[in-house]
Every structure is written in structure tokens, then in C-alpha cells.
Image (spheres, grey):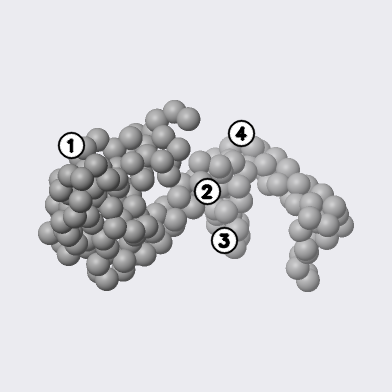
Amino acid sequence: MPTATLLPGTLDLLVLKAASLGAEHGYGLLLRIQRASRGALAVEQGALYPALFRLESQGLIEAEWGLSDNNRKAKYYTLTRSGRARLARDLDDWHALVQAMDAVLGATRAEVLALALSGRGPQALAHLEFGSDFVRASVLLVDELEFWRAEIERGMVLAKPGSITP
């Protein structure tokens, strides 16, 4: 799997999630992120340790000294109650962002136009020039109506009472 670039502001979320899986030292958290992403996310140690310090300073994680697998002294990080609450909020925000991005990136011109026109009546056409834009919009709307009519006929979509049915 190719590596992906971390988006600004996402490292804290990844560290909180990795720490939520159980106490682990810094390098172990880095490996958790790398393994969970199947190698797509490579967190640099130079970015990880300032993030751990920042999260600890904010009271979102706490550290306790222990021995690593190779008998070296290491700080083991766990989430605090505030950290769990922050992780839950940040995950909700992240999922909302991903859903919105998917909607935008997967949108077709017809869908966007239909959304712009839905429930607004003829005034929604005011911004379109009569001519090629109007014709294109009309063709797209007719295509969209035909698509949904076919979906209803195939039983893929349930028609609401009073809606367009075959």
C-alpha cells in the first residue's frame, strides 16, 4: 500500500486513538499507527514526541515510566478521561468531514443541480441564462427524473405517496 501524507491536525487524533488501545511507549504508538494503516501512514519520531508532549500538557494523555521489551526505561502513555472525551468528539468531527468530502467528491453535475433546485421552484432557475445553461439544466433534470423512475420500476427505491411513479 502506498504511503499517505498526514493532513495537518490529524496527528493528535491518531495518537489519541493509538493510546486508547492500551498503555504503550512512544515508539510503540508510532508502530500501532503504522500497522493499523497497513503501512500507509508513516509518523516520524520528530513529529510524534512533540505531539505526545502537547497532549500530555493538555491533560489528554498521561505517562508513567516503565521498562520496554528490551529492558530500557520508557514512558508508557494512556488516555485520561478528558482524552477519551476528546477522542470521541474528534472522531465524530472526522467522520462528518469524511462524509461531506465523499459527498462533494462523488457528486455529479445533475445531483448538484437537482439539490440546488429542490424545493425552490422557478426562482431557482433565475441564476441560469436562458440558452445553453437552461437547456443543459433541463436535459440533466429530465435525465435525473428518468433515472429515478427506472430505479422505482426496478424496485430499488420506494416511491412516496404523491411522487412520480411509473
Earlier-in-chain disc, 3 versus 1: 1
Discs 1/4, front:
1
Which residue is label 4 attached to? 132
User: Dot 4 surroundings within 10 Å: few (below 14), some, or many (20 or more)?
Assistant: few
The residues bearing labels 2 and 4 have C-alpha atoms spaced at a distance of 27 Å
Earlier-in-chain disc, 2 versus 3: 2
Give the x, y percent position of residue 55: 19, 56
Horizontal relation, residue 24 to residue 54: left or right: right
Q: Residue at x 59, y 63 (%)?
A: 119
**Split into 4 quadrants, where in the image is the C terminus?**
bottom right
Total count of labels: 4
Q: Secondary structure at mark 4?
A: helix
Earlier-in-chain disc, 2 versus 4: 2
Earlier-in-chain disc, 1 versus 4: 1
User: Dot 3 surroundings within 10 Å: few (below 14), some, or many (20 or more)?
Assistant: few
Earlier-in-chain disc, 1 versus 2: 1
Mark 2–mark 3 CB contact (< 8 Å): no
Q: Looking at the picture, tell me which residue is in the foreground, 149 or 155.
A: 155
Discs 3/1, front:
1
Q: Residue at x 36, y 44 (%)?
A: 33
The residues bearing labels 1 and 2 have C-alpha atoms spaced at a distance of 35 Å
User: Mark on residue 120?
Assistant: 3
Horizontal relation, residue 94 to residue 75: left or right: right
Identified by mark 1, the residue type is Gly
Give the x, y percent position of residue 39: 41, 34
Earlier-in-chain disc, 4 versus 3: 3
Q: Looking at the picture, tell me which residue is in the foreground, 158 or 9.
A: 9
Which residue is label 1 attached to? 46
